[in-house]
Amino acid sequence: MPKFQGSDYYDIESILSEDEILVRNTVREFVDDNILPIIEKHNRAGTFPFDLIAKMADLGMFGSTLPAKYGCAEMNNVAYGLVMQELERGDSGVRSFASVQSALVMYPIYTFGSEEHKDKWLPQLASGKKVGCFGLTEPDYGSNPGGMITRAEEKSDCYVLNGAKMWITNGTIADVSIVWAKLNGVVHGFLVEKGTKGFTAPEMHGKHSLRASVTSELILQDCMIPKENMFPKTDGLKAPLMCLNQARYGIAWGAIGAAMACYDASVNYAKSRIQFGKPIAAFQLTQEKLAHMLTEITKAQLLCLQLGRLKDKGTMRFQQVSMAKRNNVYHALEIARMSREILGANGILDEYPVMRHSANLESVKTYEGTHEMHTLILGEDITGIPAYV
């Protein structure tokens, strides 16, 4: 197979900094050397490649934008996005691991935690010595997190948590869980450490998507946690939604990586597959598909690049993130399906990455806000009228 070069029809590299290019190329090489050779085996077995965690930490992939004092890389947000892009070119499950560790665990600890929380957890999470997860979604409350029924009750020396969370990436393997619960009717964040009495995190099985990722339930039954384990700076649903916005940003970039992997497989296959005496790349219908793929990838890249620049300036709005997440995942899934069409029957084999990316993107389209919810977020921003209440 030829070495992966990426898709850059509009010469976007010319407006990236040297540091951003270095980060992208480093992670691209890491994916080629460490993820692609093993990912199909893990996808078949339904296992996460744990050996990658320390290697990813060594390259600064966890909490990449956070301060160096906590052992983090202090990248800008475009560089972080490029990390997510390349990781998802390897596999959505691997990108999900890094995205949860960074955007849904380290970000809330840094943003809402005490200095003691930051000093204790951020260096260990950055180094990969500890793993975290984020518990917001519940069995009966996904798109409407405000309806959560997980409760915290204050006692003299602790908080007692009761409830359940669902679809939690990294839950079973997490050393610390960021659990969101209502205390006197107001949403707060709590640090729940592995081994806490009354807390269990059984792994969910039977997935046809994100098979190389650990997905879990979190069950809290009279789970007593120290008072100092409540975040001091969370007071309402805005806090977990801010975390989700960080994750959605990384997903928007990651989807580009999955789309590029499928497009690259399609181009290489179409040039080498001979039918009716010529490569199928010579047929107009195939060329139309490839042109559509490349156009949507280029549009997605431009959306994310400007989004990252806005984020670095501090002017990014959450509705803009919704647009990028909604658009990029939708078209990445469309590209994966088109790629399967070009590859024909070979497209269902795991000799090629196409079917795996297609299955994974079905989940990516749903999590961190469904396509429909992001549509309504944009709709409200356009009209001033909320349609989801």
Image (tube, rainbow, N blue to C red):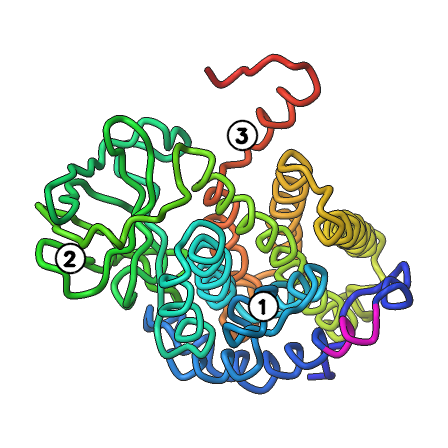
Crowding near the residue tagged with mark 2, few <14, some 14–19, many ≥20 C-alpha atoms within 10 Å = some
First in residue order: circle 2 vs circle 1: 1
Mark 3 falls on what kind of element? Answer: helix
At 37% from the left and 56% from the top, the residue drawn is 208
Q: State the residue position of label 2.
A: 200
Expressed as whole percent of the image width and height from the top left, the position of residue 240 reads 43, 42
Per the model, the C-alpha gap separating discs 2 and 1 is 32 Å
What amino acid type should be assigned to the residue bearing mark 1? Answer: Pro
Q: Position of residue 177 (x, y in %)?
A: 30, 57
Give above or below for 51 relative to 286.
below
Q: Name which quarter of the figure residue 345 lies in.
A: bottom right
- The mark that comes first in sequence, 3 or 2, is 2
Q: Is residue 337 left or right of residue 264?
A: left
**Drawn side of residue 320 relative to residue 12, left or right:** left
Q: Is residue 292 left or right of residue 246?
A: right
Q: Is residue 110 at least partly visible in the picture?
A: yes
Sequence-wise, the earlier of marks 1 and 3 is: 1
> Element at badge 1?
loop
* Range shown magenta: 17-22
Give amino acid for label 2.
Answer: Thr
**Position of residue 378 measured from the top left corner of the image (x, y, whole percent):** 64, 27
Labels 2, 1: front one: 1
Q: Which quadrant would residue 120 be assigned to in this image?
A: bottom left
Residue ID for mark 3: 372
Disc 3 crowd rating (10 Å Cα; few below 14, some 14-19, many 20+) is: some
| Residue 109 vertical placement versus 16 (above, below) | above
- Label 1: which residue? 67
Q: Nearer the viewer, residue 271 or 319?
A: 319
Residue at x-position 21% and y-position 65%? 194
